[in-house]
C-alpha cells in the first residue's frame, strides 16, 4: 500500500486477495472468481493464516483484523467489503486514541 490504508477500496482488496490466492493454487489472478468462497480454493489453515498476516501487513492496519472477515465471508467480494469497513474503523479508533 501507499502507507495509508484509509484510502483502500474493496476492489483493491479483492484484487490483492485474488492475486495471492492465485499464487497459492497456481492459477491466474483473472481465474480467481471474486464470488467464490475461500473453501473452494482448498488452502490449508497455515496458508490461510499466512494470507491474513500478509493482508494486514499490506494494509498497514494499526491492529489485527478479525480472521472471520476473510474466512467466514460468503465470497472474496463480500470479504473485501467487510475488510474495508474494518480497516476504516481501526484507523478511526487509532486516530481517536492519539487525539485523547
Image (cartoon, rainbow, N blue to C red):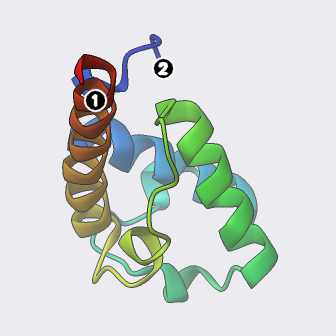
User: Is residue 64 or residue 50 the one in the foreground?
Assistant: 64
Q: Which residue is mark 2?
A: 1
* Element on which disc 2 rests: loop
Identify which residue is drawn at 31% across, 30% down.
Answer: 97
- Tell me how far mark 1 sits from mark 2, CA to CA: 8 Å
Question: Could you say where residue 78 lies in the image, as x and y percent from the top left?
Answer: 22, 68
Question: Could you say where residue 70 lies in the image, as x and y percent from the top left?
Answer: 43, 69
In the image: residue 79, left or right of residue 56: left
Question: Could you say where residue 11 lies in the image, as x and y percent from the top left?
Answer: 25, 41
Q: Earlier in the sequence, mark 1 or mark 2?
A: 2
Residue 76, image quadrant: bottom left
Identify which residue is drawn at 39% across, 81% down.
Answer: 37
Contact between marks 1 and 2 (CB within 8 A): the answer is: yes
How crowded is the residue under tag 2: few (<14 C-alpha within 10 Å), some, or many (20+)? few
Identify which residue is drawn at 47% across, 59% down.
Answer: 31
In the displayed structure, 76 sits above or below 30; it is: below
How crowded is the residue under tag 1: few (<14 C-alpha within 10 Å), some, or many (20+)? some
Q: Considering the image in quadrants, where does the C terminus appear?
A: top left
Q: Which residue is mark 1?
A: 8
Question: Could you say where residue 77 lies in the image, as x and y percent from the top left?
Answer: 25, 62
Amino acid at each position: 500500500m501507499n502507507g495509508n490504508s484509509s484510502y483502500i477500496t474493496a476492489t483493491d482488496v479483492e484484487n490483492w486477495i485474488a492475486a495471492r490466492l492465485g499464487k497459492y493454487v497456481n492459477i491466474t489472478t483473472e481465474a480467481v472468481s471474486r464470488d467464490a468462497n475461500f473453501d473452494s480454493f482448498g488452502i490449508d489453515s497455515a496458508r490461510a493464516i499466512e494470507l491474513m498476516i500478509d493482508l494486514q501487513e499490506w494494509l498497514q492496519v494499526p491492529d489485527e483484523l478479525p480472521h472471520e472477515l476473510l474466512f467466514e465471508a460468503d465470497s472474496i467480494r463480500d470479504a473485501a467489503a467487510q475488510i474495508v469497513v474494518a480497516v476504516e474503523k481501526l484507523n478511526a479508533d487509532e486516530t481517536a486514541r492519539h487525539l485523547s
